[in-house]
Amino acid sequence: AEVVIEEFMTGEEASFFCLCDGTTALPFGTAQDHKRVGDGDVGPNTGGMGAYSPAPVMTPDMIERTMREIIEPTMRGMAELGAPFAGILFAGLMIT
C-alpha cells in the first residue's frame, strides 16, 4: 500500500479555459461552481448545482499569472514531449 500526504489548501476554486493550437494558448473564460447544497455555501457538496462566469476571483492579474505560471509551461512541456496540445485546455485552480 502507498500513502500520499498533501498539504490542505484553503481558498477559492476556479475553472480556467484556454483555446490552444499546439503552440499558442489564448484565455477563453473562467467559471466557478456552486458546490454546496445551501445558500451561503453551506451544507454538503452536490454533484454540481450550477456555475457562474466570469469567476470574480480571476482578476486580470490572476489570469496573467495563471497563463505565465501554469498554462504556458504546460503547453511548452507537452510540445517538448512530442505531444503538442490543440483544443480546449481546462485548468482546475485553487486560488490561495
Image (tube, grey):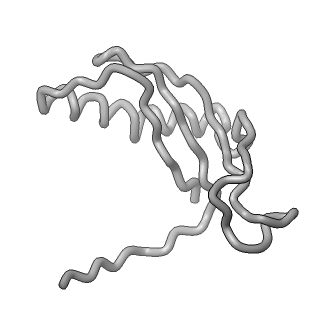
- Image quadrant occupied by the N terminus: bottom left
- In the image, taking residue 15 as reference, residue 45 lies left or right, namely right
- In the image, taking residue 62 as reference, residue 33 lies left or right, namely right
**Quadrant assignment, res 51:** top right
**Quadrant assignment, res 5:** bottom left
Of residues 4 and 37, the one drawn nearer to the viewer in this rendering = 37
Of residues 21 and 70, the one drawn nearer to the viewer in this rendering = 21
Q: Is residue 54 above or below residue 15?
A: above
Q: How many marks?
A: 0
Of residues 7 and 48, the one drawn nearer to the viewer in this rendering = 48
Residue 78 position within the rendered picture, expressed as x and y whole percent measured from the top left: 22, 32
Which residue does the image show at 39% across and 34% down from the upper left? 71
Which residue does the image show at 46% across and 20% down from the upper left? 19
Residue 90 position within the rendered picture, expressed as x and y whole percent measured from the top left: 46, 36
Which residue does the image show at 56% across and 34% down from the upper left? 63
Q: Is residue 9 above or below residue 73?
A: below
Q: Residue furthest right?
A: 39
Q: Residue furthest front?
A: 47
Q: Is residue 3 above or below residue 88?
A: below
- Image quadrant occupied by the C terminus: bottom right
Of residues 71 and 4, the one drawn nearer to the viewer in this rendering = 4
Which residue does the image show at 45% across and 32% down from the upper left? 67
- In the image, taking residue 14 as reference, residue 20 lies left or right, namely left
**Quadrant assignment, res 59:** top right
Residue 10 position within the rendered picture, expressed as x and y whole percent measured from the top left: 59, 68
